[in-house]
């Protein structure tokens, strides 16, 4: 069914914008940069998502044979400045609206839209969510409480569908020491990308590696990023999901001119163990990965390697993207004992005078997988391609069009399914002020 962009939908977007404006007007009594340094941006995002499972009909015990939906999203991001004084205060708000454009019960549950309460196979016509964040700044130290979009090694929010998911809690980031960034955070809830309700934090259960209802009261994170020099950054982060797992991360980011181009390196080491009462039972994983790349005249060629050791797969929070060099469009290559390698090629057509065009393709192959309940070695591979264009001038300047395609195959179909996937994304960002 195709739902037009109705007057009701326009009114909803207008209400979100009006709320942001009213909040700003009410705050005019505050001095200085609270208003002057504020900003408001609206992103309109249209997403077509098609995932074709290559294992038969809708009667397959693993579920439907296809996911196919189209939806329209709006994301309003309002950020205030800070009040004057030694301690500055501010307020941010995120408003999100999703509208169904095309969906059928046979092909729903794509992650774009929530299902109706009465029929899990039927998607809602529309849904909305809002998040508010209070913030305080002292010098170069900022404390935020409320809705957060963390982009950190041990917690990267997912934005791979129509609307991003949100986490709720407190986060402190300090840059008072030159070249050193210190982070501490405590989170207690999250709102999934296709949901309006805040939920308890839970362990991701991809491919039934862990139970799907293992929840925790809170998630703590601490981190240090040190810029050694212009070409080298060192990172250490620690996180713990209460009574489920603890995780440590060490990373190095480096780049060095070599000849006419630039050589880059990204090294990541993660160590995960069960914590407290071990509600998910035994967790024992070491994830090692590295990506080396060389960029020259618009071209970039990269090679990656990733290795899992220990008895289990790598754990991470539901609603997040694992910080792995071989995390791709469909798969994460994070199964127990898995080893995988990647070849990647990027090209920026600016080098040919075609500004705004870019291309990426990559291939990852994984083997040596320890599959629960079978002696045979698990194997899998994925191939991704992406073409993107950003309009450079005129009425539609900064409008982006992106085509993403993925092919995934595996030999352990009891837990994972072969996939052919296509995503078409049209996005336009409007600076309101």
Image (cartoon, helix red, strand yellow):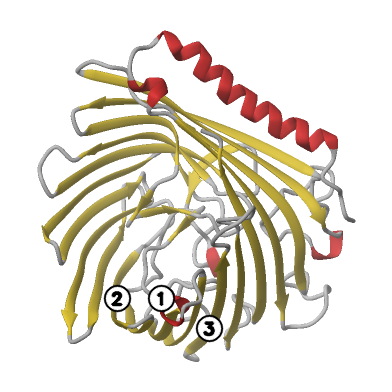
In this view, which residue lies farthest toward the top? 29
Q: Position of residue 176 (x, y in %)?
A: 14, 37
Look at 65% across and 69% down and name the residue there.
423
In screen coordinates, is 182 left or right of 19? left
Q: Which residue in the protein does label 2 denote? A: 289
Residue 9 shows which numbered tag? none
Dot 1 or dot 3: first in sequence order is 1
Report x, y in % for residue 44: 64, 48
Residue 26 in the figure: left or right of residue 229: right
Relative horizontal placement of residue 4, taking residue 184 as reference (left or right): right
Q: Is residue 255 above or below residue 246?
A: below
Q: Which structural element holds mark 2?
A: strand
Image mark for residue 382: 3
Q: Residue at x 68, y 37 (%)?
A: 128
Q: Do the residues bearing badges 1 and 2 touch, measured as CB atoms within 8 Å?
A: yes
Quadrant of image for the N terminus: bottom right
Q: Is residue 148 above or below residue 241?
A: above
Looking at the rendered structure, the secondary structure element under dot 3 is strand
**Label 3, residues with CA under 10 Å away: few <14, some 14-19, many ≥20:** many
Q: Nearer the viewer, residue 374 or 34?
A: 34
In space, the residues marked 3 and 2 are separated at their CA atoms by 17 Å
Residue 326, numbered circle: 1
The single residue placed furthest to the front in the displayed view is 394
In the displayed structure, would residue 193 be above or below residue 208? above
Q: Position of residue 74 (x, y in %)?
A: 65, 44
The answer to whether mark 1 and mark 3 are in CB contact below 8 A is: no
């Amino acid at each position: 069914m195709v739902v037009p962009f109705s007057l009701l939908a326009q009114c909803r977007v207008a209400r979100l914008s009006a709320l942001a404006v009213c909040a700003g007007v009410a705050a005019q009594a505050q001095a200085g940069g609270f208003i002057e340094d504020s900003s408001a941006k609206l992103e309109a995002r249209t997403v077509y998502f098609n995932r074709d499972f290559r294992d038969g009909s809708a009667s397959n015990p693993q579920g439907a044979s296809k996911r196919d939906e189209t939806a329209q999203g709006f994301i309003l991001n309002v950020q205030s400045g800070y009040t004057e004084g030694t301690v500055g205060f501010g307020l941010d708000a995120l408003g999100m609206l999703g509208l169904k454009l095309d969906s059928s019960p046979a092909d729903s549950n794509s992650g774009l839209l929530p299902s109706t309460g009465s029929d899990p196979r039927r998607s809602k016509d529309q849904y909305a969510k809002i998040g508010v964040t209070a913030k305080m700044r002292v010098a170069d130290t900022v404390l935020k409480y409320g809705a957060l979009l963390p982009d950190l090694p041990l917690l990267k929010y997912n934005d791979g569908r129509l609307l991003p998911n949100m986490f709720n809690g407190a986060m402190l980031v300090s840059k008072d020491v030159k070249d050193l960034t210190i982070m501490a955070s405590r989170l207690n809830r999250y709102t999934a990308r296709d949901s309006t309700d805040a939920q308890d934090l839970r362990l991701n259960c991809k491919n039934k590696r862990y139970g799907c209802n293992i929840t925790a009261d809170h998630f703590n994170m601490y981190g240090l990023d040190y810029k050694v020099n212009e070409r080298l950054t060192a990172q250490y982060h620690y996180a713990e999901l209460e009574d489920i797992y603890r995780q440590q991360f060490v990373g190095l980011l480096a780049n060095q001119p070599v000849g006419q181009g630039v050589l880059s390196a990204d090294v990541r080491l993660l160590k995960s163990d069960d914590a407290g009462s071990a509600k998910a039972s035994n967790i024992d994983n070491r994830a090692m990965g590295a990506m080396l790349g060389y960029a020259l005249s618009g071209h970039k060629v990269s090679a990656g390697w990733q290795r899992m050791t220990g008895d289990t797969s790598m754990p991470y929070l539901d609603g997040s993207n694992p910080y792995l060099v071989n995390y791709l469009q469909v798969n994460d290559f994070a199964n127990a004992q898995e080893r995988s390698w990647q070849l990647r090629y990027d090209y920026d057509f600016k080098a040919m005078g075609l500004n705004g065009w870019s291309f990426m393709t990559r291939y990852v192959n994984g083997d040596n997988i320890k599959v629960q309940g079978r002696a045979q070695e698990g194997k899998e591979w994925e191939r991704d391609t992406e073409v993107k264009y950003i309009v450079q001038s005129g009425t539609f300047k900064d409008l982006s069009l992106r085509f993403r395609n993925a092919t995934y195959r595996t030999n352990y179909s009891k837990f994972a399914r072969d996939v052919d996937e296509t995503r078409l994304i049209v996005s336009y960002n409007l600076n309101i002020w």
